[in-house]
Image (spheres, helix red, strand yellow):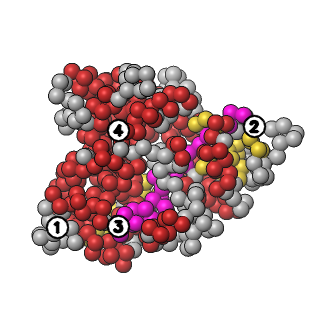
Amino acid sequence: MSVSARPLAGPVSRNPLGAYRDYRADPLTLFYEQAVAHGGSVRLRLAHQRVHLLVEPDHINQVLVTNAHKYEKGVSYRSLNHLLGPGLLTSGGELWKRQRALIKPVFARRVVDNEIPLMVRCARRMLDRLDARADRAESFDLVPELMGFAADVVCRAVLGTDIDGVLPQIEDDVRQGTSWVMRHMAAPLSPRIPTPANLRFRQVVSRLHRVVDEIIAGRRDDADAAARSLLDRLSAARDDAGHAMDDAQLRHEVLTFLLAGHETTGGALAWTIYELGRNPAILDRVRDEIDAIPGTSTDIEPALPALERTGRAIDEAMRLHPPAWAFSRTALVPDRFDRFDLEPGAIVVISPFVNHRWPEFWDSPLTFDPERFTRDRVKARPPFRYFPFGWGAHLCVGQHMALTEIRIGIAMLLARYDIELVNGLRVRANPQISNFPDPVLVRLTRRDRPDSSPR
């Protein structure tokens, strides 16, 4: 940093790694506690990197909105690029603008709502599996089941074909690829180095590419495939020059949807169940709303918009436990803020987890209170207090799909079962690419509700 630049304040450490070990152990606590200790935005040393964690809304707005042209997606996205390729999540510049314009209509509300019957079928398959566990009165970790439900939905909605034979392998490869990405973010050695982990990762990527490429080719050859899946719509999309995505770009986007679609949605489902389980009075109010749904599968779809209490509980769970707990940018040119400067190459981190719990933004910030999300309070809330799906131009295109899927999952689970948390009132957060609880041990009891269960 130049002599004239004003560095952002941060903790002083004699440890040559700075706060790196604390970051590896618990990044959520590190970010939150250091931001509180320094009254907001703070600079942290993580091994060889100096990270600027921005908290104040004016600082975040400058990076994401007013001066967004001065920044590119940060180093964490480079690790993801090894798994996903240059898709919407990892790309920038003109490629990102083109892909965003092509993809956004594919996730329009009317298109996503056509997938609601598919989401309900996937939820039924999950409930059929859970019935056996309920009948045995066994305790088990609910997180893998919820992740499996989310993966089932996104694979079938995106790929739109009979994938029962390959779905387990896709799910397993995505999990293995995600684990490699997290290790690579912490220690970014070249994936070309033939370590055992890198060799396994190459096999994972090769399998994913082969399966997705075969599905893309099959859909292109299927004369009856028009608009039956999100992949079909992506294939048919054209930019302003009339050009379509080639098969490689389609693969990048499909892999992006498979990863983002099941990681974030499954995590949000798990956190919502956890918070409702430890707040029985709120659970009762949510369940009263769900119990008003008539009992046929055709009735749950029109009833979804009426599940306002359920929606508020989901929003509040994502406030306390945002699946996308942090994201990064890298400064391309100098940028001057009110009390510090950033120079080219500076790493910026923005953490919804920190802002969603910031004492100046929220009353009793650690309390689970869905009434924060009544319509009037949402309208009155200033920017950058709550942004679980990002902000501005980079707002997640799949937001409506994720929230619809979560609402269906919660409604059908709570209609069918009483859910008892058996690992007490605390679980451990597991902040990987997304943030999910690990584990959520539950015991299910079937409810005697034959006339109103949304089946």
Which residue: 22% across, 72% down?
292
Asked if residue 423 can be seen in this view, the reply is: no
Q: Kindly check if marks 4 and 3 are in contact, taking CB atoms under 8 A apart as contact.
A: no
Mark nearer the N terminus (4 vs 2): 4
Along the line of sight, the residue nearer the viewer: 159 or 28: 159
Q: Is residue 22 left or right of residue 97?
A: right
Mark nearer the N terminus (3 vs 1): 1
Q: CA distance from mark 3 to mark 1?
A: 16 Å
* Mark 2 neighbour density, 10 Å: few (under 14) some (14–19) many (20 or more): some
Q: Which residue is mark 2?
A: 334
Q: Amino acid at mark 3?
A: Glu
Q: Position of residue 449 (x, y in %)?
A: 15, 72
Q: Amino acid at mark 2?
A: Pro
- Which mark, by number, is residue 294? 1
Q: Position of residue 319 (x, y in %)?
A: 49, 61
Question: Which residue reaches farthest left?
Answer: 450
